[in-house]
Image (cartoon, rainbow, N blue to C red):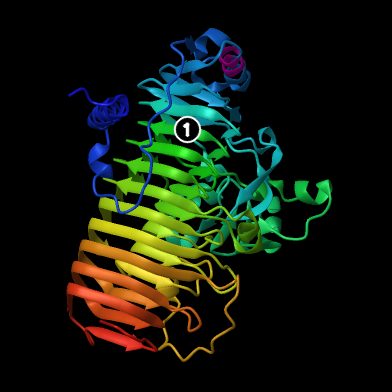
Amino acid sequence: MTKPLYVIAAICLWLFSACQSADYKYEAVYRNLPFDMPRVEAPRFPDRTVNLAEFNAVGNGETLCTSAFADAINTLSEQGGGHLVVPAGVWLTGPIVLKSNIDLHLEKGAVILFSPDVDLYPLVETVFEGLDTRRCQSPISGRNLENVAITGEGAIDGNGHYWRPLKREKVTESVWKQTTARGGVYKRPTYWFPYPETLKGDTISNMNVPQNLQTEEEWQSVRHFLRPVMVSLIECKNVWLQGVIFQNSPAWNLHPLMCENVLVEDVQVRNPSYAQNGDGLDLESCKNALIVNSTFDVGDDGICLKSGKDEDGRRRARPCENVVVDGCTVFKGHGGFVVGSEMSGGVRNVSVSNCQFLGTDVGLRFKSKRGRGGIVENIWITNVSMMDIPTEPITFNLYYGGKSAVEVLESGEKVPAKVEPLPVDETTPCFRNIHVKNLICAGARRALFFNGIPEMPIENVVLEDIDITSRLGAEFIYSKAVTMKNVTIRNTEGEQVVTRFCEDMK
C-alpha cells in the first residue's frame, strides 16, 4: 500500500534530522541533556580573505596598526564579509571594532598586542559588573552584530598590567619592585595604583563602578580607573571564539553580553593569578551557549554566568539560560565554575560536565546577596574532579561582599548567628533545583559550605556520588531539602556534617 505523502514527508524529515545529528561535532554533549536547547554551531563566513599586512601594517611590536585593522575590517565588510587573516608577527594596536560576517583569524605565531596608551581608548556606554555605566572602550568590541568570530592559533594580549592595581601580598618581591618602579600612587603601602586618576576612581566607586558622576569632566577625571574588559560583544548573534590564546586583560577577559548562540571552543584564557578582576569568561544574559574543551588560568573567577546587578539587572530582565560547559579545565582562579554575584536577571538551564579544577580557590561557587533578586535554578553538574582547593569544592554564599573566598577565610570566620528574615520581594535572591553528581575532590579545607538566608533558604540541592577529602566537614546554614546520596566526606577535624537553621535535610 502506498504511504500517504505526509507520512513520507515525516520520514524524510526524521532521516534528515538524524543525519544532521550524526554530523554534529558535539552531539555527545547534548545526549541526555536535561533541558531542551538548540544545537549551537559555528557561524559560516563567505569564502573571502584579506591579509592584515596588505593594509600597511607592520608586525614589529612597535608600529601602531590601529588604522590597518580598521581599514581591513571595513574593506572586508563592504565586500560582504569573510576572513581577516593576521599573519605571524607582533601587531601593536589600539581598539579593534568588529563587524558582522567577519572572522578575525590569527595564524600560528600571530600576536595582537594592545597598546597601553590610555588615550587610545575613549569612554563608551557599556555594562560592567552588571551595572549600566561608562568604561574605556574595550580592546576588541562589537555590538548588534551577526556572525562574528575570533579564531586561529595565535594570541591576543591586552597589556593589562599597565591598567590594573596591585596588592603587595599577592606577588613576589621582584614583581612588586618591577611594577611599582613605573611610578604610580599608593592607597596604602601595600596597595599600588598605576595612575593618580586610578586611585581617585577607586575612592568614589561601588565595586569598581564609579557613583554620582554627572559631567564629562568628572568622567574624564577618573578615566584611567575605568579599565575595560578585553573582548566585549554586546547583543550579538552567532558568536564563535576558537583556538586563540586570550591573555593579560585590563579587567575581565571575555565578556559576551546579551548574546545568542555563543560557541567557545579550544581557547586558552590566561591572566596572572594576582590580576585584579581578571576573570576568564563572563557570560552575561546570554542564551544558547556552548563552552567546550577550553582552559582558564586567571586572577578571578574562571567560567562565570551573570545576568545583571540589582535594579539594572532586574530592569533588563534577561536571564543567562541554556548554557552547556563541557571538557574544560580551570587552574588558578577564585572559582572554577561560578554563578553570580550579578544574577538579578536569573540563571537557568545549565549543564556542566567533564571538567577539572586544579587549585582554584573554590570549585563550584554560587554567590549573591540580599537586594539583588533573581532566580538561579535548574543546574546540573556531573563528572567534575578537583584537587588542592584552599576553601570548599562547593560554596553557596548569599552574603557576598566582593572578597574572594580565600580573603574571607583570612579575615577570620565566626560561628553564624541566627539571622532575622526580611520580607520576600523582587530583591530576594533565590537558589534552587541544583544537582551535583559524580564529583571528586582530593584536598580541601572544608567539604561543603552552604550559607543561605532565612527568608529564602538554598533549596532542593541534590548531592549524589560525591567523594571529598578535607580538613573540616560540611556546614549547612539556612538550607532546605538538601539531599545527599552516597556522599563520602573524609575530614580530619571536627564533625562530618553540621547544620544550622536548616530543615528537611536528607
Secondary structure of residue under mark 1: strand
Asked whether 306 or 272 is in front, the reply is 306
Relative to residue 122, is residue 84 drawn left or right? left
- Let me know if residue 390 appears in the view: no
Q: Position of residue 455 (x, y in %)?
A: 51, 82
- Residue placed farthest to the front in the image? 1
For the point 31% across and 77% down, the residue is 482
Residue at x 50% of width, y 27% of height = 147
Q: Amino acid at mark 1?
A: Asn
Q: Which residues are magenta?
A: 72-77
Please name the predominant secondary structure of the magenta segment in the image: helix
* Quadrant in the rendering for residue 495: bottom left
**Is residue 461 placed above or below 251 in the rendered structure?**
below
Looking at this rendering, what residue extends furthest in the top direction? 54
Q: Does 127 appear above or below 18?
A: below
Q: Quadrant of the N terminus?
A: top left
Viewer-side residue, 191 vs 341: 341
The image shows residue 217, relative to residue 315, as above or below, that is above
* 73 within the magenta span: yes
Q: Position of residue 414 (x, y in %)?
A: 42, 86
Q: Give the labeled residue for mark 1.
A: 238
How many numbered marks have been drawn onto this rendered protein structure? Answer: 1
Please tell me whether residue 171 belongs to the stretch shown in magenta: no
Tell me the quarter of the image containing the C terminus. bottom left
Most foreground residue, 244 or 406 = 244
Snapshot quadrant of residue 274: bottom left
The residue shown at (82%, 46%) is 216
Q: Is residue 305 above or below residue 270?
A: below
Residue 17, how many percent across, how many down? Answer: 29, 30
Judge whether residue 410 can be spotted in this image: yes
Mark 1: few, some, or many residues within 10 Å (few <14, many ≥20)?
many
